[in-house]
Image: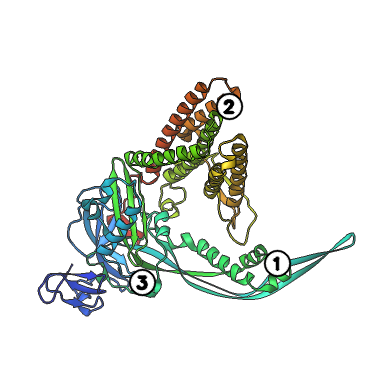
Amino acid sequence: MYACPNCNGNIKFDPATQMMRCSYCDTQISPHDKMFARSADEEKGIGDDEYEITYYTCPQCGGELMTDDNTAATFCSYCGASTILEMRVGKEKKPDYIIPFKKTREDCVKEYRKVLRRAIFAPSELRKDETVERFRGIYMPYWIYNVKSEGEFTANGSVSKRRGDYIYTTRYGIKGDLNADYNGIAYDASSSFEDRLSEAIAPFDLKDSDEFTSAYFSGFYADTDDVEAELYDQEARDVVMADVAREAFRNREYSSHGATATDVSQALEKKEAHVNHKLAMFPVWFLSNQSNDRVSYAVINGQTGRAAMDIPIDIKKYFIGVAIISVPLFLLSVFVSERADAVMSPRLMLAFIFLLSVVALIFADRQGDELFIRELLFTDRGYNSRRTPEQIKETQEQLEGNVRIKKSKPKASAGKGGLGSALIYGFGVFCVLHLIPIGFFNELSIVAAVLVFIVTLIVGIVSKARISRDRVIVKAPVSRKIGTSIFPIASMIITALMWIINPVSDVYFYVTAVIGMALIGVAVSKLVSKHNTLTSRKLPQFNKRGGEEHENDR
């Protein structure tokens, strides 16, 4: 804590003015002023590349924050526990850079509420003032990678021409000079900060970075770096080489001589690259909400204001919203059918319910896989790098038999569209076909709609597989998904059987339709529940750091 030289009040860093500001007398001082330098007595035993800091460790989850203030911290930003955190004083290695907070708490709250305004089904608890008050400004550690590579490379190409019954192939070796120097590739250096969240609020602009001084911490907290810099060396190199390959391929010499983007990439992969890294602190507004044994996060980039939030769905609000939307649509369909002198046939009604069941099953399957990956933290490299051998073994046992590598031909760019867009487009065509008066609700239109739906679905899946490198596919065990999938499957079975049996009385169709819709309703409620699980995570249990053990790690 720093004292104001005029009134002895607590002076803190103010993002709005980018100055140290006293809230009592409004005195403003530069963060690099000599008054913030440690005295000779304070600097005893502290090296030039170190600074003294106060650590707060959560007794429940082991999460650790540090600050220049010595006021008691009363809740943990990672598990949301309301408890007095354990405090100690220690030394920390100085980062090379720091990006000061640009967005004030007021800016942060404004962006948070702006996102929630679009989330009409979000629980009311997220909008309460006491929830918003828990936002905390935290400087997150990031490794900044600089990648340099130079020298000559050769890409292979070939051009084939047919002459009569023969095909003549000319092979080329296209040489190029490489001089790549990339700076500022950033990856978060904290195992406590989930990679998914850190990537969602990226990027940070290093043009706003400043020479580090702990004065910036006054009024804020900071997380400790516990992820080894070498963890992302190869990934940083791959990012650079992929970008270089794209730039190089723009030269027509490669395409005109038969070299593809893949050929250029393979040539560049053989080149050595020098990678070095520096430590930086980036500003993040951080909010945690604990509910029972789960916790969800909202994070906002303290420089740009970009937000990433875990937003659950209030099941009551959701079904009220469905009812509000369904009633006008039903009335509209009745009006249109009367004008068109058409009535939905029982068989058509079952076909529509069958399609809804298929959609529900697809989403249940995808949601089950995503939840399986999320719960195992399979994709969070920073967190996994800090896990114990026992934890890693446990994860490997759960993943055994459920992971496979899908080989896909490298493309110049990723395919667009995918499953989601196929579903939307397929149902769009489905609706359009039934709004045409001539073909309104007849057997031909339903068959055409089903065929279009299936084709667009296949196209979407194929386009989704067009990626630039091999991908890891994780499928959750069937036992993990059966609870959600059983209801749409049951709806599909009973509607398909009734379609095949085709009884004389329409009563059977209507009873089946009611049962099918009820099963879909249960499936939707299950999907909402799974969504809420996906927007939260188990209470974290970090490897506790503290005392001599932490000092030795440094």
For the N terminus, which image quadrant?
Answer: bottom left
Q: Residue furthest bottom?
A: 34
Nearer the observer, disc 2 or disc 1?
Answer: 2
Q: Is residue 547 above or below residue 486?
A: below
Mark 2 sits on what residue? 499
- Is there a contact, CB below 8 Å, between mark 3 and mark 1? no
Q: Which is more foreground, mark 2 or mark 3?
A: 2
Which of marks 3 and 2 precedes in the sequence?
3
**Percent position (x, y) of residue 104?**
26, 66
Instruction: Give the labeled residue for mark 3.
Output: 97
Q: Is 288 left, or right, of 414 in this rendering?
A: left
What kind of residue is marked 2? Trp
Label 1 belongs to which residue?
A: 259
Q: Secondary structure at mark 2?
A: helix
Count every numbered label the image shows and give the total. 3
Is label 1 in a helix, a strand or a loop? loop
Q: Residue furthest left?
A: 7
Distance CA(mark 3)–CA(mark 1): 42 Å
- Amino acid carrying mark 3 in the image: Tyr
Residue at the far top: name it. Answer: 504
First along the sequence among labels 2 and 1: 1
- Give me the residue at 34% from left, 70% from top: 99
Q: Is residue 137 visible?
A: no
Q: Is residue 505 above or below residue 109?
A: above
Q: Nearer the viewer, residue 409 or 57?
A: 409
Name the one closer to the observer, 289 or 193.
289
Determine the image quadrant of residue 287: bottom left
Q: Position of residue 454 (x, y in %)?
A: 61, 42
